[in-house]
Amino acid sequence: MLRRTALALVLCATSCTQADGPSAAESPRPEQAALGTAEQAVESLETPTEANSIRFLEQSSFGPKLARNVAPAPVGTVERVMAVGITQSLTDQFALQPATPYDGELAQDLGSQFFQRAVTGEDQLRQRVAFALSQIFVVSQNGIPDSSKTPYVDSKVALAGYMNLLSQHAFGDFRVLLEEVTKNPAMGRYLDTANNRAFDSQGNPIDPNENYAREMLQLFTLGTDKLNLDGTPALDVNGNRQRAYSEAQVKAFAHTLSGWTWNAAACPAKGAAINTPDYKNPLMPCNDNHDTSRQELLRGVLTAQGGNITTHLTQALNNVFNDPNVPPFISKQLIQHLVTSNPTPGYVQRVANVFKNDGTGARGNLQAVVRAILVDNEARGALPPSSLRPGFGHLRSPALFVTNVVRWLDPTLDTATKDPGLKLSNWSKSMSQWVTRSPSVFSFYPPNAPLPGADGLVGPEFAILDTATITARANFLHEFLYSTTLANSGIGVDYDLLPGTTTELVAYMGRYWLHGTMAPTLEPKLLAAMNDSRANTAIRKKKLGLYLTFLSPSFQIQR
């Protein structure tokens, strides 16, 4: 049974066509026609259909919600998007300030805080983009040991500050974000920039630690291969891939970024270190432990001979930020997290062009990049463009699977006397995505993980899908729908809000939760199961229908 379920998920991601629901007439936007892209009708961004609005919220939030006759429709609901349009919905989300900051000194687990915000917060797009950034600029609680020298739990305070940083800069300047990440104390501990000295205790020159320099280049900005603007590998005259950076350049960046340490009243002497971590303030520059010599960075750029630590930091980050690899590398990963694992080169190039220039001459404007991702023809419409459907979308990661299920059912969360977020976090953890505790600097899954059984396609989230985690997905749904632990955890669901008959409920789920993507064979199977004599009460019929629909490939794969 488990093997058949896994196979169904793989096949759905690679070869299932969409349901036989209506699709719009095919007429590309002028700018896309010029690029030779998608044959899909283009709905007006100002008057999106219901299905397009639902699809937009799947991509820009932690799950759609219905206003349920509340007027005016609240921000983040399907009815609100339909009423004001996608352009205005994005503008509204960009204007929302970050929700209550994460607090590392609360007893409440950070994963619990994350899921409560994801389920109930208004600033859905900011949180969703920050979550995507956290899987690119990875820091994990697992890599931050606690110190007896601090009056708090180091890993919690460090990650709370880091998550707040990503939230604050989610719509900001990528260059500013890169510098804030570089000086962040959580990153300082995780990838060894704190106390990364260029001299030993006798004052002799040494090679600094290369961890941050290497991962900044490989994972945070460039990737390993030189890229064309459309994200495809740039080949040399012999058709071979080219490295985006060399080992010598990794060493050069390590020297250029040496000398930073924990915030304190004064810098240590040459070769010495500050041993009391400070996770509440950025790292402090200490020139005595910095290598002031000239280093050759990317594209033959040299740092200033005798330059101080802050000058060299600026030169290093400017050098990386202006590399031609950054726009396609970052743009593609953001598309993968928000919309689809396998964007076309044209999609990547359109977004990368906005990264290069937002229309005002600014480079790295993340707000403009996010808008470009979400209004692109490949993202918009009731369904993906017909020619792209076989490989379009992505498996919902565990966190997104949990939040989409929960938000569709619009539960009440009792946060006054219980900790419902912890239950949600533990469900995600059981499926191998323990938020704030990624297993490595490569996050929970790498962006280039191959899709099983599909030559040439990637499926990042499938890297953590196996028989154990498929079982965990089913167990989550079963516990959520049938167990008394739901109420004990402070999560309440009103099933009376759902249609009362099996036929109406199946149509309702197809209309909203699957927005026209229900596999043709799913509807009769749902009706047969819900009308089985063993589902002998109205509530049992409803819960069985929910269980089977949420577990189906039609829902597991976000299209």
Image (spheres, helix red, strand yellow):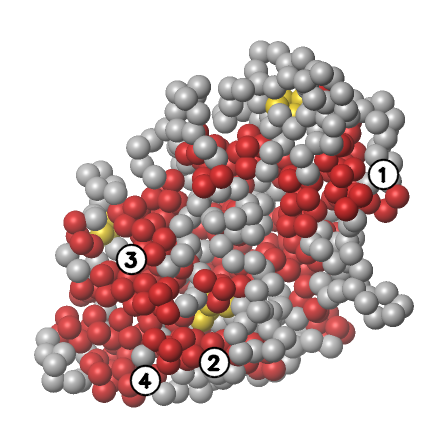
The mark lying in front, picked from 1 and 4, is 1
Q: Is residue 273 above or below residue 430?
A: above
Q: Residue at x 80, y 60 (%)?
A: 242
**176 w.r.t. 198: above or below:** below
| CA distance separating discs 3 and 2 | 31 Å
- Find disc 1 in the rendering and name its residue: 296
Residue beneath disc 2: 11
**What amino acid does circle 1 point to?**
Glu
Q: Position of residue 479 (x, y in %)?
A: 22, 61
Can you see residue 356?
yes
Where residue 200 appears, as percent x and y from the top left, is: 70, 22
Residue contact at pointers 1 and 4, CB within 8 angstroms: no
Q: Is residue 174 above or below residue 408?
A: above
Q: Nearer the viewer, mark 4 or mark 3?
A: 4
Residue type at the position of mark 2: Leu
User: Which residue is at a point 67% across and 34% down the rendered structure image?
Assistant: 209
Please report whichever mark, 4 or 3, sits nearer to the chain's N-terminal start: 3
**Which label's residue is closer to the chain start, 2 or 1?**
2
Q: Which residue is mark 3?
A: 410
Q: Could you classify mark 1 by the number of other residues whose Cα lies within 10 Å: few (under 14), some (14-19), or many (20 or more)?
A: some
Q: Would you call the spot at circle 3 few (<14 residues within 10 Å), some (14-19), or many (20 or more)?
A: many
* Residue 305 horizontal/vertical position (percent): 87, 26
Q: Secondary structure at mark 2?
A: helix
